[in-house]
Image: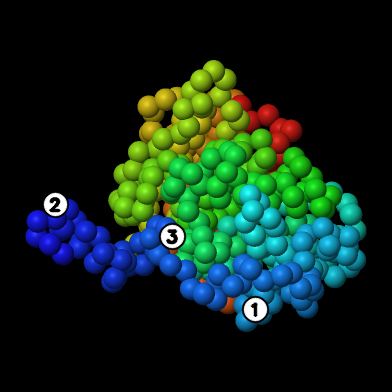
Amino acid sequence: MSPFFPFASVHDALWSLFARGPVGLAAQFFLDPQTTVADTTAKERLQMKPQRVTHEPPSFFGDTSNDQFRTGAAPVRQFAREAGGPQPQWLSSRFEHDGITQYFKIYVPGGYDGQPLPMIVMLHGAQQDPDDFAAGTQMNAAAQAQGYIVVYPEQSEIANPLRCWNWFRPADRGLKSGETAMVAALTREVMAMYNVDDARVYVAGMSAGGAMAVNLAVMYPDLYAAAAIHSGVAFGVADEPLSALCAMNDGLGQVRLPETFFDGEHPRAVPLIVFHGDADDIVHPRNCDQISAMRRLLVGTPGDTRPPRPIQVENLENVENGHAYTRHVFHDHKGVLIGEQWLVHGLGHAWSGGHPGGSHTDVRGPHATQEIVRFFGQFALDQPLR
C-alpha cells in the first residue's frame, strides 16, 4: 500500500479485521458482494433448469447433507396442492423476483389439509442455509407442535459469497426492489399458494438474518404481525460494509428510519421479541438495546433513542441446564404488550437453546425457538396494538 494513499492505514486495518479473529468473522456479515467474484459453481447453480419437487422423508429439521435443494426444484405452484395429508413435508422450491431466482425451503406440518394456518419466515445468518438453520433452531419441531407453516429463504452465493443478507445497503431495504422487497414478495407468494392466515404471518432471523427481519418489520408492518430478532442490529445503522462493521462492533450506530415515517400518520409498529447474548463478540450486545429503543421511533418519538421503560423485569440467575438471563417485558400506556427483550448471560453469537445439528447454536437455554413461538401466538394483524 502506497504511503501517499491518504487512507492507507484505515485500509490496512480494515483488511486485517477481515483476516483474523472474532472481528474478522464478524466482517463476513458485511462483505460487499460487488467487490468479490462468486465461484463458478454458484453461478451455474442459478442457471440450472428446475428438475422436480423434493419430498424428503418426514423430518422436523431436514438433512443438512441433502444437496438436492441447491440443484433446482419446481416452483411452489407445482407442489402446493400436493402438500396435504397426515405426514409433515420438507420441500424445496424456487421463486422468481425481478428476474432473479430465489431458492427456498418450506415446512408444512403433518395433518395440514387446507385449513388456515399461521406462517413464520425464517432468515438464516452468514454461512448458513435453510437446512442448517432449521436443524439448529428446531423451528420445524415447534411448527409441527403448534401448527405453523415455515418458510426458509436462502441467500445465494451470487448475491453474497458468504450467504449474508445485504441488510445494510439502502438498495436492499426498500419497498419496491432489493432483498427486503424480495422476501416480502416470497412471503405473499407462499401465502397465496397455501391457505395461510394472513393476519398471522411472522418473521424471525439470526445475525444478518435478524437484521433483515428488522428491515421487514419496519418496511412491511401490515404484512408481519410480529418479528423476532436474535443477535441482530437495528434499522438504518449502516449504509455500506465499513459502517455496518462498526455498528456491529460497538452498537453505537444511529438508527435512521425512512423519512416517510415522520410525514403524517405513523404506520403500525410491529411487536418485537429480541434475543442477544451478553458474551457475543461478533455483534455487540448494545445492539439489543438499540433494537428495543428503535420502537420509540416507530411509534413517533423522533430523536428519542432511549430504551423503552420495561413494565416487567425477570432475572433468573440459577437456571438448570441453561444460562442465566434477564428478560424485559414492555407494554404501552394502555397496558398492551409490545415487546420482549432477552439478554442471555454467558451466551455468545449463537442461537439460545439451539440444537447441535446446526451451526452457531448453544444447547443451553433459554430456548429461543419456544419463546419466539409463544410470543408470536399473542399477535395478529387484526388486533389493536396501540
Label 1 residue SS: loop
Which residue: 60% across, 30% down?
268
Between label 1 and label 3, give the one nearer the viewer: 3
Q: Give, as a three-letter code, the residue at label 3.
A: Pro
x and y percentages locating residue 109 in the rendered image: 79, 63
The earlier-in-sequence mark between 3 and 2 is: 2
Q: Give, as a three-letter code, the residue at label 1.
A: Asp
Image: 56 above or below 165: below
Residue 60 visible (yes or no): no
- Residue denoted by label 3: 33
Between label 2 and label 1, give the one nearer the viewer: 2
> Mark on residue 6?
2
> Mark on residue 67?
1
Label 1 crowd (10 A; few <14 / some 14-19 / many >=20): few
The CA span between labels 2 and 1 is 47 Å
Nearer to me, 113 or 264:
264
The CA span between labels 3 and 2 is 25 Å
